[in-house]
Image (spheres, grey):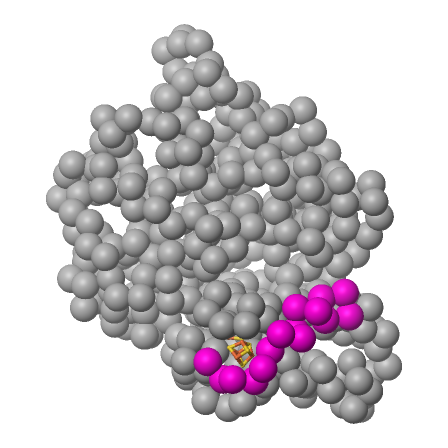
Amino acid sequence: MGVKIKFEQARRFQSLLEPCTRCGYCTFWCPVYQEEPIETCVARGKGVMIKALLDGRADYTDKFADVLNKCTLCMTCAEHCPFKAQIPQVIVGARADKFKAKGLGFPYNVVFKWLLPHRTLFGNTVRLASWFQRIFMPKTEGTIRHLSFFLSALGKGRQIPSIAPRFLRQLVPVMNSPRGGIEARMRVGFFSGCMMDFVFPDLGKKIIDFLTKNAVEVVVPREQVCCGAPVFLGAGDLETGRKLADANVRAFADLDCIICGCATGVSALKDYAKFLADTPERAEMYATFGGKVKDISQFLVDVLKLPVSAYQASAEAKGLKVTWHDPCHLKRYLGVKEQPRQIIRSIAEVKYIEMTRPDWCCGMAGTFTISNYELSKKIVAKKLETIKAAGADAVVTGCTGCMIQFIDGFTRHKMPQRVMHIMELLE
Ligand code: SF4
Ligand code: SF4
């Protein structure tokens, strides 16, 4: 049955839909349409559907919502659209309108509304899950077959890394001074994101260590919470998104620069102003906050301007042939493309190979992969083929979401290649 919805958010972004001439050029680029060549899978079809909603010619049924969820928000359509239509943003608006009218069912409400805004509670729940995971779940090649308990809805047989025995907040102090007593040239905040806190804490520690080695003082505020990407971008829950955004703004209030090693995290923190600003005060606060946030590779190259000699290969990276995967949130949302390549090419003992279509979406996209796992697997399979064809030992990236997707893909396809974060290449 249809739902009565006001479409406040979709109307906010409606002008971005208007330039669409229905030329169909986006069909050649959309990763979803390439796997399911149905009109409702591509930006053009979704745009027509949203327009019908706004004109009162269609109902926002559950089936309709499923169609709008079949989008990775990769922005490839917008990047290539000859008429500059920006349909993914209207999709986010329409999802938010649906959420406001209908909400989401269990267990999403439990995770989004109750756990994500409360970091300690979230951490303790993840910790509890990890105990059960170790006791009950069989391990395979460093990954587990199922997520346990409240995260089970997110799993569906996915190969995912284990929850770390110690979280990042337990591995590093709040204040991390430059090593060897050298004077700090800069002071930055470190935004870990949930994945780096709970699943990849060693990676978070490595980033912090690299920064302190290069004379940067790193503050890791304990009050920081989830970036909110799955909440306000994926599910359309703007109210919880605002709670998370306000908490993060408060946590980093006394810092002028915030570094994050996850492209989705960086992008979400910057998107607060676009999607969550409901008052002039919040608009200003979020814009100021977003302006401070930088991706780690962007920070190293554009701000620190480290010399080539700073980029030495880590023991695990020496002798590897690697290729770079552009996370959608890094290349298309933030325009960061050359900086990571510059870093990798600077590492003498690592061979860099550019793969075909390095910016092809991996199909992760947060909640997309949960509700469309079969489709997500097809999209990543194509990516895995290009990595293999490039002859790389490892695909390197800068987004923890993409990393999870590649771990799942390589394991399922029994491929010898691995995924590494760009900072894992560095000593
Ligand atoms: S979104 Fe752009 S590329 Fe796609 S049909 Fe519309 S005008 Fe053409
Ligand atoms: S954002 Fe990506 S997945 Fe969504 S319609 Fe555009 S190209 Fe397709």
**Quarter for ligand 1?**
bottom right
Indicate the position of residue 223 as horizontal and vertical percent values. 67, 34
Q: Is residue 18 magenta?
A: yes
Pick the residue in front: 425 or 50: 50
Indicate the position of residue 313 as horizontal and vertical percent values. 22, 35
The residue shown at (29%, 69%) is 384
Quarter of the rendering occupied by the N terminus = bottom right
Decide if residue 198 is in sight here: no
Indicate the position of residue 315 as horizontal and vertical percent values. 20, 36
- Please indicate whether residue 306 sits to the left or right of residue 113 in the image: left
Decide if residue 7 is in sight here: yes
- Please state the extent of the stretch shown in magenta in the rendering: 11-25
Query: Compared to 178, does 347 lie above or below?
Result: below
Q: How many marks?
A: 0
The residue shown at (65%, 73%) is 17
Residue 234 falls in image quadrant: bottom right
- Please indicate whether residue 269 sits to the left or right of residue 413 in the image: right
Query: Compared to 334, does 144 lie above or below?
Result: below
The residue shown at (41%, 8%) is 181
Query: Compared to 182, does 347 lie above or below?
Result: below
The residue shown at (68%, 36%) is 288
Residue 48 falls in image quadrant: bottom right
Q: Main secondary structure of the magenta part?
A: loop
Pick the residue in front: 150 or 252: 252
Indicate the position of residue 141 as horizontal and vertical percent values. 30, 59
